[in-house]
Image (cartoon, helix red, strand yellow):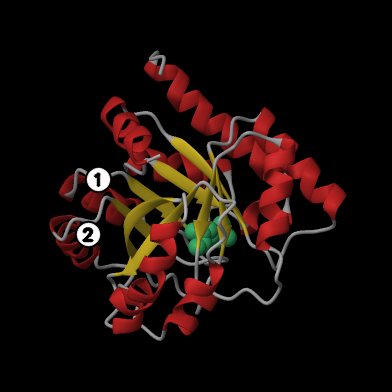
Amino acid sequence: ILTTLSDRKIKGIKSFALLVDPDKIGDHGSFAKLVAQSQENKVDFCFVGGSLITTNNIGEIIKIIKDYSNIPVVLFPGSNMHIESSADAILFLSLISGRNPELLIGQHVVAAPILKRLNLEVLPTGYILVNSGNQTTVSYMSNTQPVPYDKPSVAACTAMAGEMLGLRLIYLDAGSGARNPVSPKMISRVNKSIKAPLIVGGGIDSKEKAQNILAAGADVIVVGNGIEKNPDVLIDISEKVNQVNESLNIHE
Ligand code: 1GP
């Protein structure tokens, strides 16, 4: 996955990730339908997880994704309790916008020996939370201060430092259900400061927002809430991503 994302970045190819929050999926039938629809609409990745999970169904969710699609499953863990061996990869998130040692390195030390035994591809990711106006679950749960919305240089320097420390992906997140997605100005500034693929998520719930975020330089866009609220958003956003990719006229 890391190689794919780096190659795609060089070619300008964009990716679309569906965020599956285990607490928010409907019944088996409707989730299976969403997965099949994601496959049809060329969703590139399913991110599974969240900062707080109250159900114990990550394994079942992955099974449904695997039964109804061949979309790679990437864990998006809130803690080392969210590791599941049937996924394909794990975002090994270091919350570099915060100063909470547990989420910078502590959880990782506990997770390392477990991950060493499993077959999951480990994706070292600098995770940057951005203040979007409302307090999201992740900003509360992480006990950290997010980067101010209108401080692109803080986000850019944080991303640069993360890359210099060896992190291979940068994830700019306004948090699930954010009122506003990360600003195009911040995305563009961060994108110009790093070579690593840039993932952007939080509050993207329309074609227009997706378009602005892709144009600003995001390599992967992550959408969860918007699709939970209105499944048509999946089709709209995937059309946008596919349109950008087709205009490049490159075949992977
Ligand atoms: C959250 O980036 C993801 O961590 C996606 O956010 O649910 O608002 O799409 P949404």
Name the quadrant of the C terminus.
top left
Quarter holding residue 6 = top left
**Relative height, residue 242 to residue 61 (above, below):** above
Graded by Cα atoms within 10 Å as few (under 14), some (14 to 19) or many (20 or more), the crowding at tag 2 reads many
Q: What x and y, as percent, mark residue 210?
A: 49, 43
Give the image location of residue 115, x and y in percent.
42, 61
Residue type at tag 2: Ala
Q: Is residue 195 depicted above or below 177 in this figure?
A: above
Does 77 sit left or right of 149 as displayed? right
Q: Are marks 1 and 2 in contact (CB under 8 Å)?
A: yes
Q: How far across and how far down the image is residue 251, in percent? A: 41, 14
Could you tell me which secondary element the residue under label 2 belongs to?
helix
Residue bearing mark 2: 159
Residue at image location 83% in from the left, 49% down from the top: 30
In the picture, the disc for residue 196 is 1
> Dot 1, crowdedness within 10 Å: few (<14), some or many (≥20)?
many
Give the number of marks: 2
Q: Residue furthest front?
A: 117
Give amino acid for label 1. Ala
Asked if residue 217 can be seen in this view, the reply is yes
Q: Residue at x 27, y 70 (%)?
A: 96
Real-space Cα distance between discs 1 and 2?
Answer: 9 Å
Residue at 38% of width from left, 18% of height from top?
248
Badge 2 residue CB within 8 Å of ligand 1: no
Quarter residue 133 falls in: bottom left
In the rendered image of this protein, does residue 212 appear above or below residue 157? Answer: above
Q: Which mark is residue 117?
A: none
Taking 101 as reference, is 48 left or right? Answer: right
**Is residue 203 shown to the viewer in this render?**
no
Which comes sooner in the sequence, label 1 or label 2?
2
Q: Is residue 199 left or right of residue 168?
A: right
* Nearest the eye: 147 or 48: 48
